[in-house]
Amino acid sequence: MTVYNKESLLNDLRKMGINPTDSLLVHASMKAIGQVEGGADTVIDALMESVCDGRLMMPMHTWKQMSKEYFVYDPKTEEGCVGIIPNMFSKREGVVRSLHPTHSMAVWGKDAEEYIKGEESCTTPCPPGGCWDRLRDINAKILLLGVNHIKNTYIHSVEEGYKVPERLTEETTYFEIVMPDGSRKGVNMKRHYNRHTAHISESFQKLAGAYEECGAAANVKLGDADCILCDAQGIYDVTRKVLSHEINCIIDRDEIPAEWWRD
């Protein structure tokens, strides 16, 4: 059994094309990587070093626990429902966390505090102009580390921007956000919902072939983990092209016609 260390992980990141000045968003499965000296801390060290002059971002979603009954979101204490790597990363020195009550993001590096500004005013999970939508504006790369597009939150933001119907609740849920000064800000927010499926993102994998063929995503490795490295702008362009043919096709169709992304 291979045991990986920081240098071997850094080598894998370089091989896949991660550069020191990149903006990199990571969805991660620690289990998929295999045995690592130092565990998740070493993985985080390698990721931070790989973009030492850029920006590292990870989801800190709390949608799973936030509800009408559990409605107070405190970014300083609320654990994300995203696994050990993002939760440990969010506690590192210099990492800041956005104030979105269900789809927050932890960010470290270049202009981190500026990047997360304004999320307390969001009224949907991944709205136009929010942290998720602006990944393409900063030419971000998205690393699906040991997971696939089912975990690719960015696709939700593309759908929101394109106003795909039947993606959000009609009613809102009231949340209170604990602000940096200790005060609370109330917000009424729509949530992800589709009457045909409990988890909208389970359909995103239908676009895997389209993303790969169009060069928006590539299969790579980190340790033992099968990974997908995506270009945010490329994912946006391919998704928009497919949706232009049939707005609700990602859920409504079992397969997406290949000619829709090839024409």
Image (cartoon, rainbow, N blue to C red):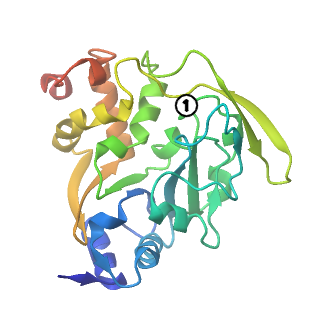
Which amino acid, by three-letter code, is at mark 1?
Pro
Question: Could you tell whether 140 is left or right of 208 in the image?
Answer: right
The reply to whether residue 204 is visible in this rendering is: yes
Foreground residue among 86 and 51: 86
- Point out the image quarter for the C terminus: top left
Residue 229 sits above or below residue 157 on the image:
below
Foreground residue among 17 and 176: 176
Under tag 1, what secondary structure?
loop
* Label tally: 1
Disc 1 marks which residue? 128
Residue 3 sits above or below residue 215 on the image:
below
User: Residue at the location (34% across, 16% down)?
Assistant: 247
- Point out the image quarter for the N terminus: bottom left
Question: Could you tell whether 34 is left or right of 92 in the image?
Answer: left
Q: Position of residue 199 (x, y in %)?
A: 38, 32
Q: Position of residue 172 (x, y in %)?
A: 64, 22
Q: Position of residue 46 (x, y in %)?
A: 41, 76
| Residue density around tag 1, few if under 14, some if 14–19, many if 20 or more, within 10 Å | some
Residue sitting farthest toward the front = 69
